Amino acid sequence: QVFGSPTGRSMAGEPPPLFLTYAHITREQLEVLSDARTRKQQKDDLGRHMGINQQEGFHTEILRDFHYNNYLFCMENKFTPEKTSTFLSLMKVVYERSIARRESAADSFTAMKDLLLKHSVQRPPFSVGVFSFDNLKVITDFVANTFYRHYKLYKYTYESHRELDIRIDDGIQYRIPFVERFTEDDEVDPRDQPELADMFEAEHAMTGTA
């Protein structure tokens, strides 16, 4: 597995909940997060809530930055805890499902909008009105200009790569074929060669020679 829930499922292997409000991070955890003293502490705590459970490395740092940038977006737009929790979980599900299914950017974006609309209209049990119409526009623009602008790079970091290592062994002895040396004394008249007789028939006919 390359990240917390690579198939868009929860850590327990279950599908994500029908609605994502407080699905991965609670109101209380968001309050603690906002009181964190350092950016590093915020990123580490948020990453843990978002299910990052792999060893330190390139992928871990990408995921931490991804979730933290989404969190900063919520803070800049003064989202309520309910909206913040929902958006963080929504992007977590979109990210993991898109990478695991190797979706195209267009297919992933369509799925993201469907999930967003599901949390923007109060029509239980099919949808809930967490986000307003104005929120939809701001969120869509943000996601399009961040995650989907670099979508190919996100996908590329999780693709398998193989390196071909070619080495030349200088210890191999190459045998150079023997080349016979010829002198002028070895030169023969092509007209005297039976194999080339057909080439000189016309010339013989004109000169009257045999």
Image: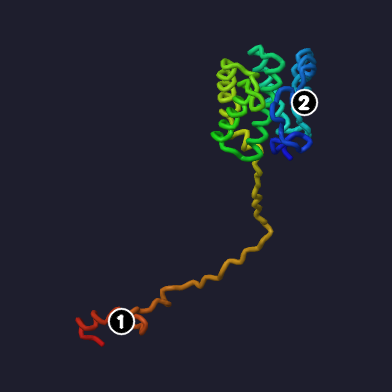
Q: Is residue 205 left or right of residue 143?
A: left
Mark 1 surroundings: few (<14), some (14-19) or many (≥20) residues within 10 A: few
63 vs 81, nearest the viewer: 81
What is the secondary structure assignment of the residue under circle 2? helix
Instruction: Kindly identify which residue carries mark 1.
Output: 198
Q: Amino acid at mark 1?
A: Asp
In this view, the mark in front (2 or 1): 2
Task: Give the residue displayed 69% in from the left and 59% down from the top.
Answer: 171
CA gap, disc 2 to disc 1? 91 Å
Q: Going by the picture, which residue comes out furthest to the bottom? A: 210
Instruction: Kindly identify which residue carries mark 2.
Output: 49
Is the residue under label 1 in contact with that under label 2 (CB below 8 Å)?
A: no
State which quadrant residue 91 falls in. top right
Task: Give the residue displayed 34% in from the left and 78% down from the top.
Answer: 190
Q: Going by the picture, which residue comes out furthest to the front? A: 124
57 vs 178, nearest the viewer: 57
110 vs 190, nearest the viewer: 110
Is 142 located above or below residue 182 in the figure?
above
Q: Position of residue 178 (x, y in %)?
A: 55, 71
Q: Position of residue 191 (x, y in %)?
A: 32, 81
* The N terminus: image quadrant: top right
